[in-house]
Amino acid sequence: MKNFQKYFKEDTPEKTIDKYINLVLKTVDPNDEVEIYHDFEDGMQKVNIKVLDRVLN
């Protein structure tokens, strides 16, 4: 599993956060399963993107 995490200032516009998320998604395989979490912590915005490992049968 790969984990991308970034903190933004509280007043950062959603457009900027969307650009970051799209940039990360361009670097991973489109067939991978991705979980995106967006939280507010201590006056900051936290974005956590988890790219899950594929299971091959």
Image (spheres, rainbow, N blue to C red):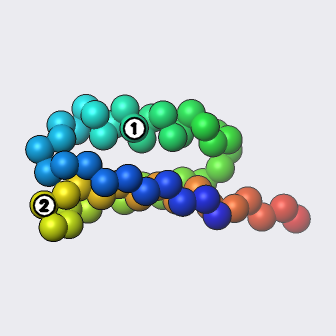
The quadrant in which residue 18 appears is: top left
State which quarter of the image contains the N terminus: bottom right
Q: Position of residue 24 (x, y in %)?
A: 51, 40
* Residue 8 at x, y percent in the picture: 26, 49
- Res 40 → quadrant: bottom left
Report the side of 54 relative to 7 (left or right).
Answer: right
Answer few, some or many: residues within 10 Å of disc 1's Cα (few below 14, many 20 plus, some between 14 and 19). few
56 left or right of 29 in image: right
Q: Amino acid at mark 1?
A: Tyr
Alpha carbons under labels 2 and 1: distance apart: 19 Å
Identify the residue position indicated by label 2 in the image. Answer: 43
The percent position of residue 22, horizontal first and vertical second, equals 45, 35
Mark 2 and mark 1 lie on one chain; the one further toward the N terminus is: 1
Residue under the image location 15 percent in, 67 percent down:
42
Viewer-nearest of discs 2 and 1: 2
Q: Which residue is mark 1?
A: 20
Q: Name the amino acid, label 2.
A: Gly
Q: In terms of depth relative to the viewer, which is nearer, 6 or 36?
A: 6
Secondary structure, mark 1, is helix
Residue lying at 37% horizontally and 32% vertically, measured from the top left: 19
The image shows a total of numbered marks equal to: 2
Q: Residues within 10 Å of mark 2 (few under 14, many from 20)?
A: few
